[in-house]
Image (spheres, rainbow, N blue to C red):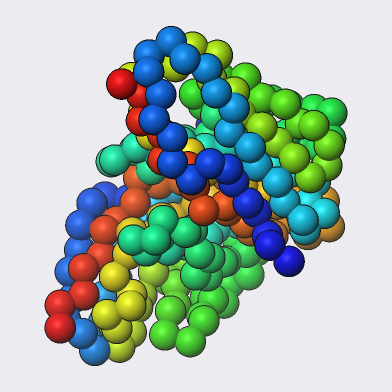
Amino acid sequence: NAGVTQTPKFQVLKTGQSMTLQCAQDMNHNSMYWYRQDPGMGLRLIYYSASEGTTDKGEVPNGYNVSRLNKREFSLRLESAAPSQTSVYFCASRDHRTRAYNEQFFGPGTRLTVL
Amino acid sequence: AQTVTQSQPEMSVQEAETVTLSCTYDTSESDYYLFWYKQPPSRQMILVIRQEAYKQQNATENRFSVNFQKAAKSFSLKISDSQLGDAAMYFCAYSSNTGNQFYFGTGTSLTVIP
């Protein structure tokens, strides 16, 4: 099992460009998440999806959109990148329905720089 | 929303010694779960240990143990016999029994001194 995979690992964008971060999990998890990690601020939730076909805003959703394409895939889109979106982005998944104490499994992260 | 506070941005410990990382949280719920994650320089988030709030016994995983004080809303991580590979950022996290979100603290950067 690959677990949670993310592409790309690194990306440099110019202000105003758009891009999509891809995430996939092969653990048959119901829930998927997108976080951003900035120095001194921990992980902040951007969006999450409790199940296929549903998405909800997290703490910092502005400037982002998401798509839960199917049970495996959850993508994050930046329509018009801004320097404030320079960050490390993590995708995570979790099997919440079978056991509430299950942890989140994380992908390796994407380091995004917006110039 | 629940808040998780890690008041120690940085900590250091001598190799083979013991260190305790602090975490407090704020919640009105009675049933929830607490986690400690480790993030080494590779950036990969790794689960270290978890605690179910309804269990009074503190969780342990080899050299890692927690001190869970429910009334005080405190959840500290003790690392015994520290090793160089323990050097990492450590995050405390909260998850309720009913909700689906995790709430993370801002992290503690642990340095292990040879």
Residue A63: x %, y % from top left: 51, 15
The answer to which of A67 and B68 lies nearer the viewer is A67
Residue A48: x %, y % from top left: 66, 33
The answer to which of A66 and A97 lies nearer the viewer is A66
Is residue B50 left or right of A98 when viewed as pictured?
left
Is residue A73 left or right of B50 when viewed as pictured?
right
Q: Quadrant of residue B114?
A: bottom left
Is residue B46 left or right of B24 when viewed as pictured?
right
Residue A93: x %, y % from top left: 68, 49
Check the picture and name the quadrant holding the N terminus of chain A: bottom right
- Which residue is painted at 77% across and 56% down in the image? A26
Q: Is residue A100 above or below residue B101?
A: below
Check the picture and name the quadrant holding the C terminus of chain A: top left
Q: Is residue A23 above or below residue B56?
A: above
- Which residue is painted at 51% across and 53% down in the image? A108
The answer to which of A19 and B23 lies nearer the viewer is A19
Residue B96 appears in the rendering: no
Residue A107 appears in the rendering: yes
Q: Is residue B65 above or below residue A35?
A: below
- Which residue is painted at 44% across and 78% down in the image? B65
Residue A90: x %, y % from top left: 52, 43
Q: Quadrant of residue A66?
A: top right
> Number of callouts in the render?
0
- Which residue is painted at 29% across and 40% down in the image? A39
Is residue A63 left or right of A103 when viewed as pictured?
left
